[in-house]
Amino acid sequence: MCAAQVQLRDRAAGFAFQVLGDLVVSNSRGVVRITPGRQQVLLAALLLESGRLQNVDHLIRLLWVEEPPETARTQVQICVSRVRKALASAGAEATIVTRAPGYVLHIDDSALDLNVFRRAVAEADALARQHRTAEAAAALRAAVGLWRGPCLNGTPSDALARVARHIDEERLTATEYYLELELELGRHHQLTAEIAALVCEEPLRERLRGQLMLALYRSGRQAEALETYREGRALLREELGLEPGEDLRRLEQAILTEDASLRLEQPAVATAAADSRPATVRPIEEAPTETTLSDDRPPAKRDHVPRQLPMDTADFVGHQDLIAEVESVLTSTSPDRATGIVVIAGRSGIGKSTFATRVAHKLAETHFTDGQLYCRLRGGRADPLAPREVLGRFLRALGLPGPAIPDSLEERGETYRSMLADRRILVVLDDAVSEEQIFPLLPGSRSCGVLVTSKARLTALPGAHRVTLDVLDQRESLHLIEKVVGEDRVRGEQEAAEALAATVGGLPLALRIVAARLAARPHWPLASMAQRLVDENRRLDELTHGQMTVRASLSVTYDNLADADRRLLRLLSLTKGSTFPGWIGSALLDAPDASPYPSDLMEPLVDVQMLDVVGADGTGEPRYGFHDIIRLFARDRLLAESDESERRAAIRRMSGAWLLLVTKAQERIFGTTMINGPAPRWHPSEVHVRSVLSAPLEWLHTELENLSLTVESLVQEGEDDYAWELAVSLAPFFEARGYLDHWARTHRKALTAVRRRGNRLGQAALLASLGTLHLNRRNLPEARKALTAALELYETLGHHHGLGMCRRDLGILERLSGRDASAMRFFQEAESDFERCPKPWARASVIVQRAVVLLRQGDVQRVEAELGEALEIWRDLNYLGGQARVLQRIGQLHLHRRQLEDANKALTEGLNIVRDDRDVIGEGYMLLDLGRVHARQGDLAQAAALFDRALDLRAGIMDRVGVASVRVDLADLARRAGDPAGARALLAESMAVFATTGMIEEHNRAADLLATLPAADLAAER
């Protein structure tokens, strides 16, 4: 056993936390039990990001697949408390620290098997680079041996499982790496069976298949190697419609021709073993010529060796992987390499120049020893340097006297390239504005390298390798602050330091400014600086120190934008969501037909890193987002440069566009619109409207955050008509998907706005919708209060459609309260109201609710006729949700007639519809009725399974009354199974809920069942 294996074995014995397999927490006494479910998910999430802040909102998304309950934050706190208690009881050396806005888990790096695995892989990579191939392979095998199965196997979180799958990829990559190294060591005979098993597990993984082909070929099994390729090719074409990649095709050709490069004695082997990311097999290229760049070539002797690099920054932190990536491009010794060109892109303040300077200084001493040329090209200014002027500077630095410098750009370029030929010189072009500025400054010799920094990505620069810098993570941010203000000072106020890093979003320039201000004022607590940055309206004012200011840095980019792009950036600060779609730009600029592709308006801002592309929506269109600091800058410019009328007009256009799209989606899903107000619409391009309407429910789910926040923003802006109409238009979707918390929050916010403005129509519509919400939650007293208030307002307005909606819902309320005669009167009045503003769907909605009362009254013929009419209405409108509700009533009708097979058929059809629509409320109702059918058929086991599923769904949306209703049916099963004690317990819980919510109908059903329990059994229970 090698030293690496012994080291990993010893580490494994001391693990406190294991995630490479099932989640395991252990101590010296054995395994520590963490309660399955949310506590395990929470601990797993903290372990995967140990030492880094985990936002509470992120934890909520991991814990709840669907819409989280209103008590989600409280439940997370409870979970954290219980996990803390479990860890403390076990004596684990782990601390969960509360840090706004979430939690941080602090553990020793060696206490987590994932950390040890990653460190071992990095150490093995270092061994491979030192050509210690056997040791590297053994270390990698030992690291892979730490895995006990898929990462976080069995942990109940889909979101966490996606993260775990990425970690599993690291295991496969490490496995491929040690196989590559062992093939280089000539162990092909021993590896054949192992690689074949891996290919069976991962048949589409081309690198593994190539390794198997090579092992077979070197073992004298050429035919099998070629058959392995053919099997892989057939599988790729069948599964993905793709041909194998270039490496695999080249390997097949090499095997066919028995290429000498496949033999172990070829020099390519040593090269591959030194590469931290080895390719499967590459044919040997021609031997280098005398002019090929070689690391052994002595530097050319020149009288003038330019050393123009600016000073390196001592407090540079982060981006170590990117530094290695850039170094590998610029120092490549591949015989087919061209001039190494790297473009470093990123937004203002991200540290592009600092990064380039750090790389340049590292390479100046080891590789580009003939000199370094540097020029700041002033790409962010109105007068960027012309290539001709830059070439003049460079030629002087290379020793050419002024009178000898040619006049024309072309001649200067020719002279420049000639002087750089066969010299190792690094050219650093800082702050470039365009490819045109760069082209004349590129050397012609591949012995040189070029580093370019730019806010734009310069994608038209041929052969360039591009690196985009991102913000620093929290650990790197704290390290930067420590380097400036001192480690002791940061550790003494760790929480305040973390708050500072989070507030500026890891932007290096902002962090340097904050740290510099603190260093200049050693008497300032870090907490005082954090408090200064809390106020968003003053944050940019605080981010300034000497000549360093965030506002000035961003202004350089902003000032060079076109007028329309500057205006769009300002107006985009009016958006509230973390991401937003591309069409919003056309609404804000009032340019619906500016381009057939809405995202085109956004791209100039993306090009200069003032806006980020953060993904794509269901239609394939990009989604955009701001860095928080840039959003503040855009708002700052909006207040300074745009007047109130422009701002308000933009808000109304954006809100009108949201409203139009929601209304269109409503028409597509329900076949009609529910209620309309006076707010003007704004029409996005027809192309986008059609793409949205191709999958309206999915679109609404994607835009849930934006739509909800828009309602709240409209309330703050005093736009009450837009606020109430958008909220009410969203209610049917909230109901269909069970987003009851969003329903309540948007409506209560909007209600404050319409009451403040005396908007009676808005008040009536919101109160009526809240009444429907309370009915869904079976909170009958609150439902009656809201619906009665809405009815009075609609009466004063003479709004017949609104009156019909209120009276229909009051009829439902009376039915649930056990007052059937009163319910029928309301249903009749609602029908009369709807006749005065004829909308077929409105009558259908009354029919579906009235059917319950008519069934109780025994009028089955009328129920059958009316339900047939309602089903036709919904089919004509193509509204599947309406059809599902009618099918549920038809199933109840068949159940009433004891036509159990027909009931099962209708309810199953309805269940399929609501499941396809992800209507959890409707699914709960369907499962309950299907359970009753099976109970009537005597299939108590299937009935119990259906009731249990219905119970889980109702509990999942915090529906206490729905849970209680299902428990009554479970109590009936318990009674029939001879368990009166169980039945009584279930009924007692349910009746207590019904009594507090006014559910007389359900209370009476439970009381009737309770009365059937035999007296003898009651005595026995006592």
Image: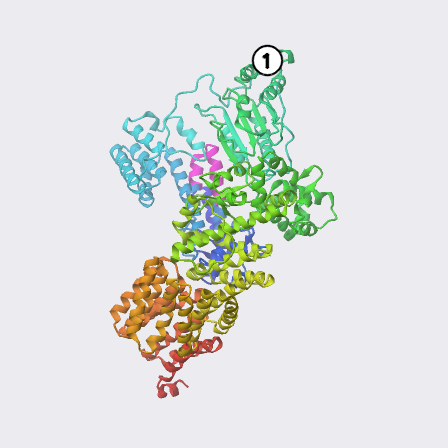
| Picture coordinates of residue 272, whole percent (x, y) | 42, 31
Q: Which residues are magenta?
A: 118-139
Residue 135 forms part of the magenta stretch: yes
Colouring chosen for the image of the structure: rainbow
Question: From what the image shows, is residue 323 above or below residue 801?
Answer: above
The quadrant holding residue 237 is: top left
The quadrant holding residue 306 is: top right
| Picture coordinates of residue 603, whole percent (x, y) | 51, 38
Which quadrant is home to the N terminus?
Answer: top left
Question: From what the image shows, is residue 998 above or below residue 401?
Answer: below
Secondary structure beneath disc 1?
loop
Image position of 72 (left or right of 840): right
Residue under label 1, please give it: 406
Looking at the image, can residue 504 be seen? yes
| Picture coordinates of residue 835, whole percent (x, y) | 39, 66
> Furthest-top residue in view?
404
| Picture coordinates of residue 53, whole percent (x, y) | 56, 51
Which quadrant is home to the C terminus?
Answer: bottom left
Q: Main secondary structure of the magenta part?
A: helix
